[in-house]
Image (cartoon, rainbow, N blue to C red):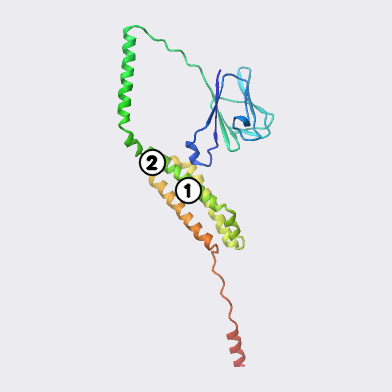
Amino acid sequence: MPYQLLLRNHTEHVLSELFARGKCLNFQEAPFAVGAADGLPDGYRLEFIEAGGALQLRNTGAAFVKLGDSVVSAGETHDIQHGAILVLGEKELRFYRLHGRPGVSWSANAVGLLAIFGVALSLIIEVAAFSGLGHYLRHSSGIQSQKESQELSARVDAVRKRLQSKELAQTVAADQVSAAYLEALREELERRVAFLRRNGEELTSAERREHLDNLARMEEFLTRFSENPSVTPAMPDVQIDGPVRNLIEEK
């Protein structure tokens, strides 16, 4: 029985990776193995073997593999089902069992030929109809939603990169209040990322634009914060010469 593995980046934290293409690996029968030569991260190697009519995963690498809610440590074996998702660090591997398709029998009589002609004619009409909808699809809500999701992901990555930059951390290191404020911004960004990950598909276009505007304001604030990281005003110099002189003169 043939099997298929789809290797792609793990999409838990990055929205744009939802639309990225993966690497497809095909195998005609078990047993078979995949490793670094097939695109897996260093330290990962997996074998797929048949045992009693079922397929099992054997972790022959040095790192553990997450299979659903289970963890398969190095040297362990675990049953694997069609559609299972394996998490290997920054990569994920999707497992599929391919079933053979039954052959199509063609009728040589007039009714069979007429049916084939009718199906072909229907397909031609459908293709002609859909070709006229290209302009509408480019402006449809589905396409716009994908563009906004990608823009949100890119903006989140840009803000996170600035918040985690070493230059900014060194700038605020001398001011505890500024450092605490920067840490609060990091936590706020992660809360927004978690919310988008849970509810991103349900947001309206207006809500996505609102999140984009908030992230833009956060970037603008970080630019001003980089130029002047102190959030507390400098203490004024104490002027004591004049009061002391007046006190001496009075006495």
Say what amino acid the circle numbered 1 marks. Answer: Arg
**Residue at the outermost top position:** 109
State which quadrant residue 251 falls in: bottom right
Q: Position of residue 26 (x, y in %)?
A: 55, 23
Quadrant showing the N terminus: top right
Q: Which residue does the numbered mark 2 point to in the structure image?
A: 144
**Where is 17 relative to 60, above or below?**
below
User: Label 1: which residue?
Assistant: 155
Q: Which amino acid, mark 2?
A: Gln
The residue lying at 49 percent from left, 48 percent from top is 156
| Residue in the image at 64% along x and 32% along y | 44
Look at the numbered disc 1 and give the secondary structure of its residue: helix
Cα separation between marks 2 and 1: 16 Å
The tag earlier along the polypeptide, 2 or 1, is: 2
Which residue is drawn at the image coordinates 51% and 41% (left, top)?
A: 14
Position of 229 compared to 203: left or right? Answer: right
> Where is residue 74 shown, x and y percent of the image?
68, 31
Numbered label attached to residue 203: none
Q: Dot 2 lies on which element?
A: helix
Q: Does residue 207 appear to the left or right of 236 in the view shown?
A: left
Q: How many marks?
A: 2
